[in-house]
Amino acid sequence: MDHSGHGHQHNHDEHNHDHSNHDHSNHDHSHHQHDHSDHDHSGHNHDHMDHSGHAHHHHGNFKEIFLKSLPLGIIIMILSPMMGITLPFQFTFPYSDILVAILATVLFIYGGKPFYQGAIDEFKQKSPGMMALVTLGISVSYIYSLYAVIARYVTGEHVMDFFFEFASLILIMLLGHWIEMKAVGDAGDAQASLAALVPKEAHLVLADGTTETRPVADLKVGDHVRVQAGENIPADGKIIRGESRVNESLLTGESKPISKKPDDTVIGGSTNGDGTLLVEVQETGDQSFVSQVQNLISQAQSQPSRAEGLAQKVAGWLFYIAVGVAAIAFVVWWLIADLQTAINYTVTTLVIACPHALGLAIPLVVARSTSLGASRGLLVKNREALELADKADVMILDKTGTLTTGEFKVLALESVTTNYSDEEVLALMAGIESGSSHPIAQSIVQHAKENNVNPTNFDSIENISGSGLKGQANGKEYQLISQKAYNQELDFNRPAGATISVLTENNQAIGVVALGDELKASSRDLIKELKEHNIQPIMATGDNEEAAKEVAAELGIDYLANQSPQDKYNLVEKLKNEGKTVIMVGDGVNDAPSLALADVGIAIGAGTQVAIDSADVILTQSDPADIASFLELASKTTRKMKENLVWGAGYNFIAIPLAAGLLAPIGITITPAVGAILMSLSTIIVAINAMTLRLDDRK
């Protein structure tokens, strides 16, 4: 995919940045929280969107299942003594246990379904984890309790049932998953937003010169299309007639609109400026720039995530421990006592192993972390982003719009002669530029306005092809031209990365203005913090070498210039293959594939919808300082998750051997009642600990 032909050789004295129609920061992202099940993703397989290997996110809508299971579960818990002890709110009546058994069967089939589906997926991947553990607990408690009820009526013996534990476990697990789904919300569809950049219809010019509107899908290579001012270009092609400025910033990351004339190439999806163009179609369908970016995105999304899923691991260990200990207990108790004792110990072990606290340990932290983040303008769409960001080695940063403002500003303006003051120079420049819609002109006029300088009135103004403007005022001829056109040395302290224009009177320089894309105020601090965290910053930009070099030098970081989407993608891939954990920060279409491929993709909120959809984290404020806040959130959240796993699972590691009767020979057994109390305690501790997550104030 060689994009070298895509207009990266333009005249870099051209500028621009009208982002007014691309500002996505006012889209309210909070509505993205739907369940995956009500999304028709039109044939794209979005199972990879949840990069987590937790297939459970696709097993129905947890909110709905939880709310429908809740009344059933509550009735069961009221009518069924907890571990054989009757709590104050519980009561029974004749045959209430049969009613409980019937309700439990309904709950087992309806409320348990997402867990068996998840467990089947885990066994297919040969890595039993949380779903397998939950399924084990609910199946054993349900089947044994059913047996207990039947035994009471058939043999008359009183066998204790576990319906209370069964119902509470299903409800807590459903609640945990609902909390987590609600917190992390839904991944947008990057493919669809990308497709939206390319217009649906094109103005096809027929052989007789008339135009008719045709669907873009019907365009063929060699067709001629007319693109009016302000329209998006329908396909990749070559200009045959017309001149205009084309804004490709969304696609290539190049910050300035590019002057285009006949024989220049244009990219489908970029925005035409003020001229009308006649374009010959050169690429359609899969070969076009936008499709190639779409292909890269889907390639990236099909890569497995490298997050370890801490809870998943711990649940996996607990699964093996519970099954192992239960099996040993069964054999040993059968040998030293009898079958009934063996069954009792085995069932108690498997029921106790089930992680009530573990099911809430992570979701409660995620929910807390997500709301903390959201209050700071950090929207975390994928919880694994937090775990991966905490161990990141490299951060790749886009330049335009990420480290710099992406808008043209007058960085410096001064008189170079004693005859004119700086203000007079500004008045002349603003006067000669007052009629032009060029971004440079706009920023000079704006600068004059901000400094309350009235533009000089010119009698006549005309274009000098390729180099600038000339005009008559006060009986003198002035020119405002590029430094290249002036072509003489100037004694002027040029700001980094700036473009220089020179004001001349009778061909002698009287003033200079430096315009450029300025660094965002917090960029320097961010780079300092990254270095403190031992994260290596690399700037990768679609912009030219000169502009990139200046910014990188100013920040003291490594850089790569003229990067196409494929180049950025290859860079992320190369670093990942070296075993590094990579964070990518960007805002344009050209960043989308690498945002999707990186371990953690961070989209700067004022960027494009495509970038926002490909990322794991969105910074709504477009402020680099928020990247540092996100790293802090990641490290604190990961720490809380680990603490909660210790509390949630620690209880199980102690309770399982006791439940199996390991210490029975010396008289220590855990009665199911004590087990239940410990279980509730660990759940409460986990909830309180999650709530203590805080972020430092950044002022």
Image (cartoon, grey):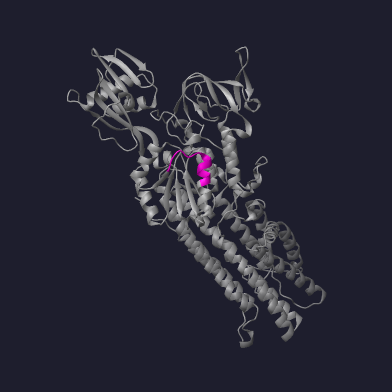
Position of residue 221 in the picture relative to residue 519 (left or right):
right
545 or 435: nearer the viewer: 545
Q: Is residue 82 visible?
A: no
Position of residue 145 in the picture relative to residue 280 (left or right):
right
**Start-end of magenta stretch:** 560-570
Direction bottom: furthest residue: 666
Direction left: furthest residue: 418
Direction front: furthest residue: 488
Q: Residue at x 47, y 20 (%)?
A: 243
Q: Is residue 228 visible?
A: yes
Q: Residue at x 59, y 54 (%)?
A: 52
> Dividing the image into 4 quarters, which one contains the N terminus?
top right
Q: Height in image: 443 above or below 97? A: above
448 or 172: nearer the viewer: 448
Q: Height in image: 261 above or below 176? A: above
- Residue 392, image x, y percentages: 47, 55
323 or 503: nearer the viewer: 503
446 or 535: nearer the viewer: 535
Q: Quadrant of residue 406?
A: top left
Position of residue 541 in the picture relative to residue 573 (left or right):
left
- Residue 111, image x, y percentages: 69, 58
The count of marks equals 0
- Residue 10, image x, y percentages: 44, 29
- Residue 288, image x, y percentages: 59, 33
Residue 279 highlighted magenta (yes or no): no
Q: Height in image: 179 above or below 443? A: below
Position of residue 491 in the picture relative to residue 524 (left or right):
left
